[in-house]
Image (tube, helix red, strand yellow):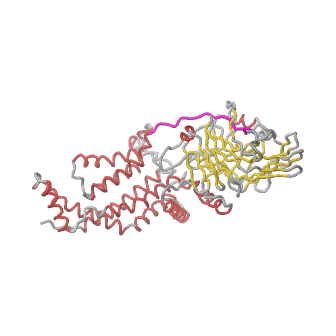
Amino acid sequence: MENKNVLAAVVLSTFVIMMWQFWYGEPVPQTQNQEQVQQQQLKGDKPSAPSISQKKVETKLTRSDAINQSDRIKIENSSIVGSIALTGALIDDVTLKNYNQDNTGDQTKVILLNPKKYDQAYFLETGWATSGNEIVPDNQTLWTAKGNKTLTPNTPVELEWNNGQGLTFVKKFTIDDQYLITINEEIKNNSNQTVNLFHYAQITRQEKPEIQDFFILHEGLLGIVDETLTEEDYDDVVEKKKTFNGSQGWVGITDKYWLTAVIPEKGKNFKAEFSYDKSFKSNYIVTDATTVNVKQTGSNISNLFIGAKEVSVIDGYAESKGFHKFDLAIDWGWFHFFTKPLFFIIDYLFKWCGNFGIAIILLTAGVRLIFFPLANYSFVSMAKMKALQPEMQRLKDLYKEDKQKIQMEMMNLYKREKVNPISGCLPVMLQIPFFFAIYKMLFVTIEMRHAPFYGWIQDLSAADPTSIFNLFGLIPWDPPGFLIIGAWPIIMGVTMYIQQKLNPAPPDPIQAKIFMFFPFFLTILLASFPSGLVIYWSVNNVLTMAQQYVIIRKTKVKTV
């Protein structure tokens, strides 16, 4: 088998896998209802943890009207601003102070959480479930603020509610200066009997949001239970509820750049659940009851992450707070042992040079330099094959009626010129994981979001906004979306075409025509990709074909 066929298979397979999901349709929005604690009867002497179900909620209000329906506790630090509803003690109003919704300059910030009566409800709650007859607070309970009514890193907040049967429930909220809220919940038992309650935390999201639906990025429900990372798409959860049991981990809901997660208290066994019943929910419930004797107090602690998936912050919580494998909240993928170190390199380069686009170019050049010997070996092999093509064609024409003779003469030619037709394949295969890891890293990390380059590229995480169909802005006409094929995608396509010409041509005419069309196809397809990825691909093409050109000029074979 000739090297060109193997290389063709590798390239085609890689791109087909990467691109096929872009032809899927738009995601179907979902509807939501509200969640509540469902009571179960005691079974035997030892209580068992009840399940958490949902309660229907009308969702017809505007966001501001929904917020104003409940008295609130204000939340603010350097990273987020929002409020906690006293009705239900729900964290249902959070805006990210350091992130704009778009790059148009209007400074509208990213809104992450919304009230339960808004049609895009997205909120977090914690509380107690019972398998007995105790009255416990739910998401309709009206809590009372004790003292301070603004939650900041320096001012905690305390909420209280009495069930009228001798049980007083207390929630003590604290917040750091980033995205972590900690809730210490207490039960004060002034009744005449021992109570057994189960602590839970839950994230509710009414609608399936707009997602990129691309196979290298997970958007949906996820969590770590013991040593296993579980990622479930929204559609999969609609079809079937997922349940897990463990003693360490966390669960949450992730977007490309944003995350909500709930983390159980260390050392507590819990049952985690991903489910859908007119709303998506990701929750855990501690499976061992908190037993509170008469005149005693019981407690449980939960941590809630609400914010941006900044690598330093996520890693910081995993290390300083001991959140088990919390760093996997960022989708580093199968090649995480390549992908994550590459991020630290490009982050260092960005801080050094001050421009993320330049950092991409420097990283691409550095990786190509590391693989220079391997690439050299591969390109020398391809160059020799290209130089042998006229002689190979002459042999095919000479012995066109005798395929066995052709194969024999080909083998003699390879031996005489010391050419192995598949010797260039292994070096290419070894490089693919690294270049895919760069691609993955640039795609999933938030650090490239809204980062400018030079010229017309003001957001490396967005597609090139120019279009060849209005001569890159010279004609006063805004083409439709499918005609927006910018300058950088065209540069990528041209460099890929030139690089293709430096490789041995496929012997089959039909295969040759397909390969000739391939750069044009990818130019159209990659036009909608983030411009930072297209710049990476273009620079990689330029460096690759420069290396190939030098090798081809130096490579000569004798055919006799």
Residue 527 percent coordinates (x, y):
42, 46
Q: How many labels does the image show?
A: 0
**Residue 297 location, x and y as percent?**
84, 52
The percent position of residue 542, horizontal first and vertical second, equals 36, 59
Look at the picture and state if 522 lies above or below 387: above
* Closer to the camera in the image, 462 or 254: 254
Q: Nearer the viewer, residue 537 or 228?
A: 228
Q: Residue at x 69, y 41 (%)?
A: 51
Look at the picture and state if 95 lies above or below 119.
below
Magenta residues span: 24-39
Q: Where is residue 466 in the image (x, y as percent from the top left)?
A: 44, 45
Q: In this view, does 549 lie to the left or right of 441?
A: left
Q: Which part of the image, by quadrant, shows the C terminus?
A: bottom left
| Rendered residue at 57%/45% (across/down) | 220
Q: Nearer the viewer, residue 344 or 204?
A: 204
Which residue is situated farthest in the front direction here?
Answer: 44
Quadrant for residue 314, please give it. Answer: bottom right
Q: Does the magenta stretch include residue 335?
A: no
Is residue 80 rendered to the left or right of residue 351? right
Where does the N terminus fall, quadrant-wise?
A: bottom left
Give the overall secondary structure of the magenta segment.
Answer: loop
- Depth check: give the residue in front, 33 or 454: 33
In the image, 320: left or right of 358?
right
